[in-house]
Image (cartoon, grey):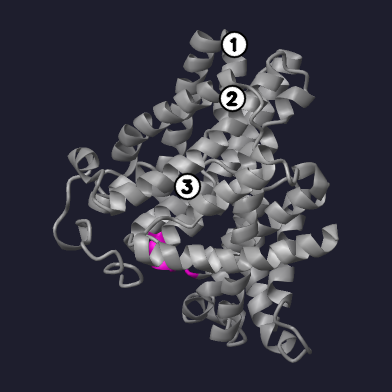
Amino acid sequence: MEIALAIGFVGLLVFLAHLFSALFERTRVPDVLPLVVLGLLIGPVLKLITPEAFGKVGPVFTTISLVIILFQSGLGLNLATLRESLLPGMRLTVLNFIGTVLVVAAIAALGLRMSALEGMILGAIIGGTSSAVVIPLIGRLPLRTEARAILLLESTFSDVLCIVTTLALVQAVRYHELRPTLMLGQIIASFLVAAIIGALAALFWSAVLQRVRQLENSMFLTPAFVFIIFGVAEVLGYSGAIAALAFGIILGNIQSLSRSALRDLLRGRAVQLSPTEESFFSEIVFLLKTFFFVYIGLSIRLTDVVLFAVGVGIVAVLFLIRIPVVWGAVGKMVRGFDGAVAAVMIPKGLAAAVLASLPLQAEVERGAIIQDIVYAVILLSILGTALLTFLIEKHILRQPYAYFFPMGEGADSLPANPHERRGGE
């Protein structure tokens, strides 16, 4: 009976996801909101399902979702846009991360009596933005191509910063030694080597794709190859997320590369994905995104009201400092509606959830407190981001953000019709 109910619920969830998507088109309420709330209801509130019921499958599923979402996003990222957005994206990533770590460390020291290193660990864990949340959100908003690319890159790059810095700080607490030079080297290597792995893999795959298509039922072999690239990069100690994104970018731009300096290397063998394959991947992303957000909701731990209140305060402060961070990093490039959306795009997700347990496992004194606060911040940042993007798009919060991100001429202004700028760049 339980298995039958579970299967029935999965089918119902897919229908609900399409319903929420249709409601978004009519009301502009992001479908992230009802999906996460649904997860909250069946998880922490009603306790119908717990994350433990999924065992080791849960983390594997969330990682698969992240890989496919990043790969598909890379397919739609133009190289010219990437060149324009790369430095601004890195600038935004670093400024947001540093600002978050410093502010959260100060809050932790003053409000929770944590040590400086413990506060910095908490800040590093929640110092990024979640690709798995950001990408579906910005994909449905009428943003300019450059703004969308900057937010995509920030969400991908920040995972590396969060992971490497958190690991280094946890080691510093355990062994009373911090090595910033080594940490910086690991971050740079993780970026560059992972990107090279993904790019070379994409060149190889584009060269053999025509032969692969001759195999029976071969459409899923491309995402399967992406999983392999992700796994190889992670096993070697580099960022699998960066590798998956780079793979998608190169594969999506393979035709323009075939006409560039790489034409002799590719020798006309490069093949890009067909519209049918891209449509198939979009369907996969839709399903994975649906289950991912429900899983995030049911995975949230609401154990301590006081720590949850601390999480509320931290998220409120993060939304406030995000405004000067975006203004300082990309204010000249991202204006009007784009700037307002960028200023509320701070959702935490998979990386933060994974890192939350590290301090406790490493026997950091306030490890349990850090974990509970991180879970609260994940939930509140996702809900807050989804709600604020809705209010901005509906012009309800237009004026406060317009002061920092004034409307530019023409396309920079907030569209009266929400569909006006989507896909029209």
Q: Circle 1 — which element?
A: loop
Q: Which mark is residue 114?
A: 1
Q: Residue 412, how many percent across, how many down? A: 21, 57
Q: Circle 2 — which element?
A: helix
Whether residues under marks 1 and 2 lie with C-beta atoms below 8 angstroms apart, the answer is yes
First reached walking from the N terminus: tag 2 or tag 3:
2
For label 2, the crowd category at 10 Å Cα-Cα, with few meaning under 14, some 14 to 19 and many 20 or more, is many
Q: Which mark is residue 122?
A: 2
Decide whether the magenta segment is chiefly helix, strand or loop.
helix
Work out how far the residue at label 1 is from the one at label 2, CA to CA, in angstroms: 10 Å
* Residue at image location 74% in from the left, 48% down from the top: 59
Q: Amino acid at mark 3?
A: Glu
Instruction: Give the side of residue 193 with respect to residue 49, left or right.
Output: left
Q: Residue 24, how many percent across, how many down? A: 41, 62
Q: Residue 254, how many percent across, how many down? A: 53, 77
Query: On screen, 262 above or below 246?
Result: below
- Tell me where the magenta segment starts and ends, as one range: 76-83
First reached walking from the N terminus: tag 1 or tag 3:
1
Q: Circle 3 — which element?
A: helix
Query: On screen, 374 above or below 388?
Result: above
- Please state which of residues 36 and 351 is positioned toward the viewer in this rendering: 36
Q: Which residue is mark 3?
A: 154
Instruction: Give the side of residue 207 with respect to residue 77, left or right.
Output: right
